[in-house]
Amino acid sequence: MERAIAELQRGFLDPAQIEASRRSMGLDRQLIGDRTYFLVESGGRLAGCGGWSFRTTLYGGDHTAGLRDDTRLDPGRDPARIRAMYTDPDFVRHGIGRLVLALCEDAARTAGFTRSEMMATLAGEPLYAACGYRPIERVARLAAEGPAVPGVRMGKSLV
């Protein structure tokens, strides 16, 4: 996660924004507890990870105050959340992100969700757009403190 944040956002954010991202992003252990988080290994190394959630929280990690809402979503009304997607920089453009995203979408679909949403980084937006996600809202500030870190709330039909 650290390497993905630090290296893959370089062309999209300045160093201060990357540092702010590091403080606002990361793993949400609720995804592990809910058994909705996937790890992909390649050659004995962790190549990527990501998850989906049936809870209200859209983004942020364990340490992100003010963004946590563990209320359960209604699959008949609410979109599933795609969360905490990271690819090791050594494995970018090897299909790892697409694989994790497909695993998340399939699991959410099996749980009865017909839509999914995520808060994408600018670095992740091209991948998600290529996978059928469309922008819903551009957000100027993801991190609560420090310089503004932009993001894009994106959504997709799962039917």
Image (tube, helix red, strand yellow):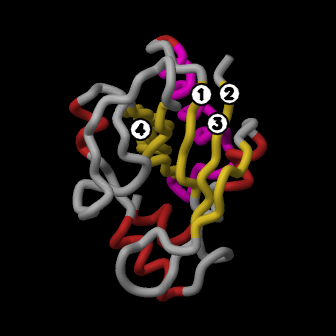
Q: Quadrant of residue 156?
A: top right
Disc 3 crowd rating (10 Å Cα; few below 14, some 14-19, many 20+) is: some
Between residue 76 and residue 52, name the one nearer to us.
76
Q: Secondary structure at mark 1?
A: strand
User: Which sits earlier in the primary sequence, circle 4 or circle 2?
Assistant: 4
Disc 1 crowd rating (10 Å Cα; few below 14, some 14-19, many 20+) is: many
Q: Could you tell me residue 117's position as x and y percent?
A: 56, 40
Marks 3/1: CA distance?
Answer: 17 Å
Which residue is at a point 70% across and 41% down the rendered structure image? 133
Q: Which residues are magenta?
A: 88-109
**Residues at badges 4 and 2 in contact (C-beta under 8 Å)?**
no
Residue marked by disc 1: 115
Residue 105's place in the image compared with 156, above or below, is above
Between label 3 and label 4, give the one nearer the viewer. 3
Between label 4 and label 2, give the one nearer the viewer. 2
Between residue 77 and residue 58, name the one nearer to us.
77
User: Which sits earlier in the primary sequence, circle 2 or circle 1?
Assistant: 1
Three-letter code, disc 2: Ser
Q: Could you tell me residue 73's position as x and y percent?
A: 38, 29
Magenta residues: mostly which secondary structure? helix
Residue 112's place in the image compared with 124, above or below, is above
Residue marked by disc 3: 98
**Residues at badges 3 and 4 in contact (C-beta under 8 Å)?**
no
Residue marked by disc 4: 44
Residue marked by disc 2: 157
Between residue 93 and residue 24, name the one nearer to us.
24
Which residue is at a point 64% across and 63% down the rendered structure image? 138
Which residue is at a point 58% across and 61% down the rendered structure image? 121
Between label 3 and label 1, give the one nearer the viewer. 1
Marks 1/4: CA distance?
Answer: 33 Å
User: Which sits earlier in the primary sequence, circle 3 or circle 2?
Assistant: 3
